[in-house]
Image (spheres, grey):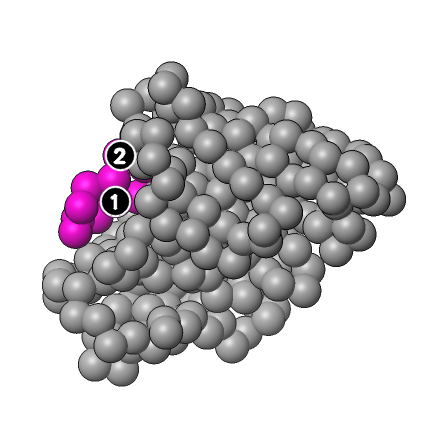
Amino acid sequence: AQTVTQSQPEMSVQEAETVTLSCTYDTSESDYYLFWYKQPPSRQMILVIRQEAYKQQNATENRFSVNFQKAAKSFSLKISDSQLGDAAMYFCAYKGNTDKLIFGTGTRLQVFP
Amino acid sequence: DSGVTQTPKHLITATGQRVTLRCSPRSGDLSVYWYQQSLDQGLQFLIQYYNGEERAKGNILERFSAQQFPDLHSELNLSSLELGDSALYFCASSVRIAGGLDTQYFGPGTRLTVL
């Protein structure tokens, strides 16, 4: 069975600085997709970024980028120029041959002014 | 705003009762997913419907059931409620591109409190 592990329960960063959130996963599938979702205090789940496993190029969305290391089964999220509005829970998620998303336990990110 | 709507936002009920949560997917999305977020279990997949038919089941209790109607909205029915059923229930929808990058967009969730 596939698993997703987020080993950092909490992280903090100063405004305008850069922070990296870690995610590792375990799978025997060759085709899969990886996602980062953000859950602010409103509890809404918001898609941040997504990556196809067959693509070697790391996905980027404005200040958000990933470091996808397929061999190491690692999918970290880098947030550049952190803003107060980035404070939230961040969930890493895996989607393989089935349609369901498998989530990690989340990392709570605090942003300090 | 993801385009996925869920009602009600909050629900408070007593043990042993039955409730229905409603979800309307984004326009054009045929697939609906239900997830449960609780403190002890995290975010867990419950069930998926695609174009009116059940597609996949996850960790869904027998006391829970769901359906997707011809207009593609979905309902999650929770019966014989227990204290442990208190959680945030999310609906998500997607186009469902088989074997492709199929992104799920989440609704705002329904907060269920069982007293």
* Residue name at image x 36 percent, y 19 percent: B70
Q: Is residue A62 left or right of residue A32?
A: right
At label 2, the amino acid type is Val
Q: Dot 2 falls on which chain?
A: B
User: Which residue is under mark 2?
Assistant: B95
Reply above or below: B63 against B2: below
User: Does residue A105 appear in the picture of this structure?
Assistant: yes
* Quarter placement of the N terminus of chain A: bottom left
Q: Position of residue A40 (x, y in %)?
A: 58, 45
Q: Which mark is residue B102?
A: 1
Tell me how far mark 1 sits from mark 2, CA to CA.
Answer: 7 Å
* Residue name at image x 19 percent, y 41 percent: B97
Which secondary structure type mostly characterizes the magenta part of the structure? loop
**Circle 2 — which element?**
loop
At label 1, the amino acid type is Asp
User: Does residue A58 appear in the picture of this structure?
Assistant: no
Q: Is residue B96 magenta?
A: yes
Q: Give the magenta-colored segment's residue range.
A: B94-103
Q: Dot 1 falls on which chain?
A: B
Reply above or below: A86 against B76: below
* Residue name at image x 34 percent, y 35 percent: B53
